[in-house]
């Protein structure tokens, strides 16, 4: 099965794109989380007071440094700009978004992965209907494997897990339950909580099931380019049955 990677840049009304157009030396990398956006903003140039004031308006600044290498800012912003998100349009065309979105010199840069080249063509045709778009590359990746930049969004992996399920999973992980050999048992883990063993085990199993289900989309992507199944016994190597 072939996979297709497409990279393109678009222009439409977006405060981050507009900011990158106003300050051409600026690069904004944007990650979407479940309830907010995280922006990494860099520039090799010394920032002006006007730029610093504009950055203050984007959201809560988590980190800011200015040194000989230039400007580096990490900001947390709300999701208000994601109405009718372009990411939803990627999913509607069966294309998997690869974060981050990069805003540079007035353009938004995106990369997507798809199983079918037709899905990529349909997505580009859809985007051309209401915004400027410039396709930078479109490549079959059937033999070279999944790009290292393809990371599963954290909020997608842990979607639908309750707080108790997350807590049960974290306790098991940090206590060495998944190491080989195991460093603890379910009984010992449950004894460290305020719930019965059966209740703790239920939280843990549900967390594991949901996590694997959510990761399934990315697992299929990672294994789609495999030449053969390493667990499948080749016909020529299958043991012969002896006649009675």
Image (spheres, helix red, strand yellow):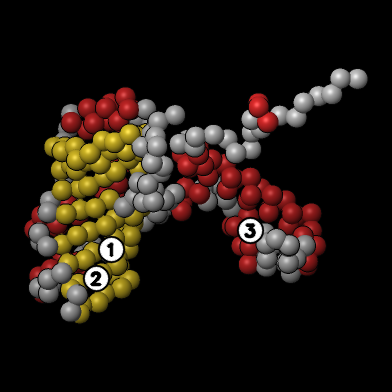
Residue 31: horizontal and vertical position, in percent?
34, 55
Distance of label 2 from label 3 (alpha carbons): 34 Å
Q: Residue at x 72, y 51 (%)?
A: 202
The answer to whether residue 92 of the structure is visible from this angle is no
Crowding near the residue tagged with mark 2, few <14, some 14–19, many ≥20 C-alpha atoms within 10 Å: some
Contact flag, marks 1 and 2 (Cβ < 8 Å): yes
Mark 1 — residue? Answer: 40
Q: Kindly report the distance in space between the C-alpha atoms of the residues bearing marks 1 and 3.
A: 30 Å
Image vertical order of residue 51 relative to residue 238, above or below: below
Query: Which residue is label 2 attached to?
Result: 72
Looking at the picture, how far across and down is residue 196, in whole percent? 79, 60
Residue matched to label 3: 169
Q: At numbered mark 2, what does the secondary structure look like: helix, strand or loop? A: strand
Q: Residue at x 15, y 48 (%)?
A: 107
Disc on the earlier residue, 1 or 3? 1
Q: Is residue 194 above or below residue 133?
A: below
10 Å neighbourhood of mark 3: few (<14), some, or many (≥20)?
A: many
């Amino acid at each position: 099965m072939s996979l297709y990677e497409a990279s393109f840049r678009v222009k439409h009304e977006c405060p981050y794109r507009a900011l990158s157009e106003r300050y051409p030396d600026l690069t904004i990398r944007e990650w979407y989380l479940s309830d907010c956006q995280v922006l990494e903003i860099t520039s090799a140039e010394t920032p002006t007071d006007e730029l610093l004031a504009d950055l203050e308006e984007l959201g809560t600044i988590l980190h800011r440094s200015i040194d000989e290498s230039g400007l580096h800012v990490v900001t947390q912003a709300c999701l208000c700009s994601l109405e009718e998100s372009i990411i939803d349009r990627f999913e509607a065309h069966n294309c998997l978004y690869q974060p981050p979105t990069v805003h540079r010199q007035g353009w938004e840069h995106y990369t997507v992965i798809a199983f079918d080249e037709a899905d990529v063509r349909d997505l580009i045709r859809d985007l051309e209907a209401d915004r400027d778009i410039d396709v930078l590359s479109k490549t079959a990746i059937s033999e070279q494997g999944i790009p290292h930049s393809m990371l599963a969004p954290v909020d997608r992996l842990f979607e639908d897990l309750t707080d108790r399920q997350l807590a049960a999973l974290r306790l098991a992980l940090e206590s060495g339950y998944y190491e080989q050999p195991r460093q603890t048992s379910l009984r010992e883990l449950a004894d460290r909580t305020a719930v019965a063993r059966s209740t703790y085990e239920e939280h843990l199993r549900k967390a594991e099931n949901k996590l694997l289900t959510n990761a399934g989309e990315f697992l299929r992507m990672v294994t789609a380019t495999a030449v053969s199944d390493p667990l499948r016994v080749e016909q020529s190597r299958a043991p012969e049955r002896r006649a009675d």
